[in-house]
Image (spheres, rainbow, N blue to C red):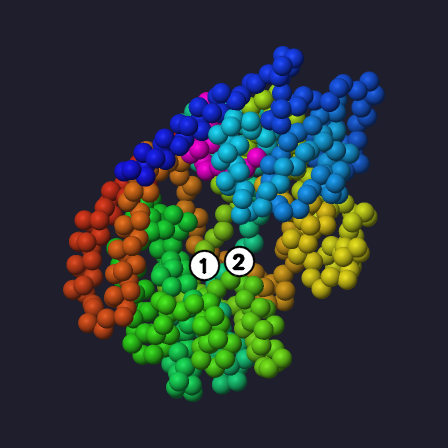
Amino acid sequence: MSKRLLSMTLVLVLVGSLLAGCGAKNAGGKETNSSGGATNAPPSNAVVEDSTNEYGDTGGLKLPLVDKPTKLTWMVVSETPLNDKLVAKEIEKRTGITVDFQHYSSATFQDKLRLIVASGKLPDIFHGLKRDELKKIGQQKAVVAINDYVDMLPNFKRLYVDENPWVINSYGDENNNIYTWPVYNMNRDVNHGMMYRKDIFDKHGIPEWTNTEEFYQALKKLKEIYPDSYPMASKTKETIFKDLSYGWGIGGASYPAIYSESDKTWKFAGVQPEHKEMLDFLKKLYNEGLLDQEFLTDTTDSWTAKMTTDKSFVTWDWIGRLDLFYNQVSSQNPEYDLRYANPIGPTGNIRTLPLINADFGITVANNENKEAALKLLDYLTSPSGSELITLGVEGVNFNFDENGKPVYPELADLPNIEIKVLEEHYGMWIEGMYLNPDRRSVYYNYTEKEQEAQDKMVSANKFEPLDPVLNLTEDEIALIAELQTSIEKSLNEFNSKYILNKNYGDKEWAEWLVTAEKNGASKYTEVFNQAQKRYEANK
């Protein structure tokens, strides 16, 4: 409880500081922005021409966004000074808004954000606060309720009011005010999953498995051929149970709380029959020497050594590993071929990554610049703004090749164009700025193996349904935090003992069910079920 009290105290301190800092005036009585300077440049007498058609699909916004030169401050995560980069200049050219980017490294950003929030001198746009923190300061009028301005924000309205009305229900406060600008369509379809040494499987005529029994038989054959091996390895320690849970239908973004599609209730994953089935399967692999005996303690280095030799042939990991491992060992073993594999478990499914995420905390300070700031976010959400932030300016810093892929002539000497390179050279792909990434961007330029992974899962539609995004109250968040640590600790301890101890079985499982209840499993899931009732009532 002391942590909860400390958290609440911090929030109250931040809110008090915000109220003290909002609406400050300088010595001359003029409203000031978060940097202490005048919010807008002196009005221009020049006629502002409509340049909307020059820049593609703005989603209904008229460019420029302002009728006089306007300066905004925007706090972002970056180690690169951004004000002289292509994106900053292009934003000013298109919108009439000059952005003063206040950039901080990822290592220092959160500490700096806390100090700035406590001072009350908020940047016009910033991100990084949690949902409950934003709600608190939003209800104190320190940041903008975006829904109040939806009529001037056609891109926000289309994505988060018309097409996905659940967003405000899930991310807003009890008055359906939303203070955070969501990010749309950022995630790849497939980012993690099972992988196998196709070169080894092919060499010995072992087909890729299509179900869990075939997976087991494949490991048995590998063990016979390579008796000193442990065919399946892992580096995620206790997280392996969460990683594999989707294949048994008990995975979810709020794990170990999971939503049951069959009866529309939230449950504790660790006491479900499917969880025992998964443990029994892993226990069988462990007992037969098919699962690495060090799977709960392996480091990335030790796991890598096994997966790049003839010690292990199957694992679960990030799809980038498919090429990283090959690049690491190809000079010694040019035949090495790690490929994305079918899932294991009765459902045969993997995790679905959300289309919309509002946990970045992108928000707008409630000051005289708020309408300009909101319009700028709306523009960057449009196809035109999305292209600028994640592709660049066609004909200026990039062109499309014959395959529709972006090419950056100035960067032709670099071996690989990644989003970090685009950040450093052009001020693109800045954390807290990309709101609706263009899928033609290099971020989605998959290697042949990564593309195979996407195609494999998408074509078969092997994805578990997304759980509802619940809107927990401050008290509920505190209660979950209080319960979850001990519940997860006891669950991980039981999982480990159940697999490693050959004597563990039905008796120990029954004892665990009693222990989980004593540790608050029902109380834990009841929080989610109460929030689910509100979610349904607000639909």
Pointers 2 and 1 in contact (C-beta within 8 Å):
yes
Residue 302 appears in view:
yes
| Residue 142 position in % (x across, y down) | 51, 24
* Amino acid at pointer 2: Val
Mark 1 Cα shell of 10 Å, populated few (<14), some (14-19), many (≥20): many
Determine whether, in the image, residue 159 is placed left or right of residue 56.
left
In the depicted structure, whether residue 108 falls above or below residue 282: above
The span shown in magenta is: 126-140
Question: How many numbered markers are drawn?
Answer: 2
Which corner quadrant of the image does residue 161 belong to?
top right
Residue 190: give its label.
2
Which corner quadrant of the image does residue 148 belong to?
top right
Residue at coordinates 82% horizontally, 48% vertically from top-left?
395
| Residue 209 position in % (x across, y down) | 45, 73
User: What quarter of the picture does the N terminus occupy?
Assistant: top left
| Residue 430 position in % (x across, y down) | 63, 45
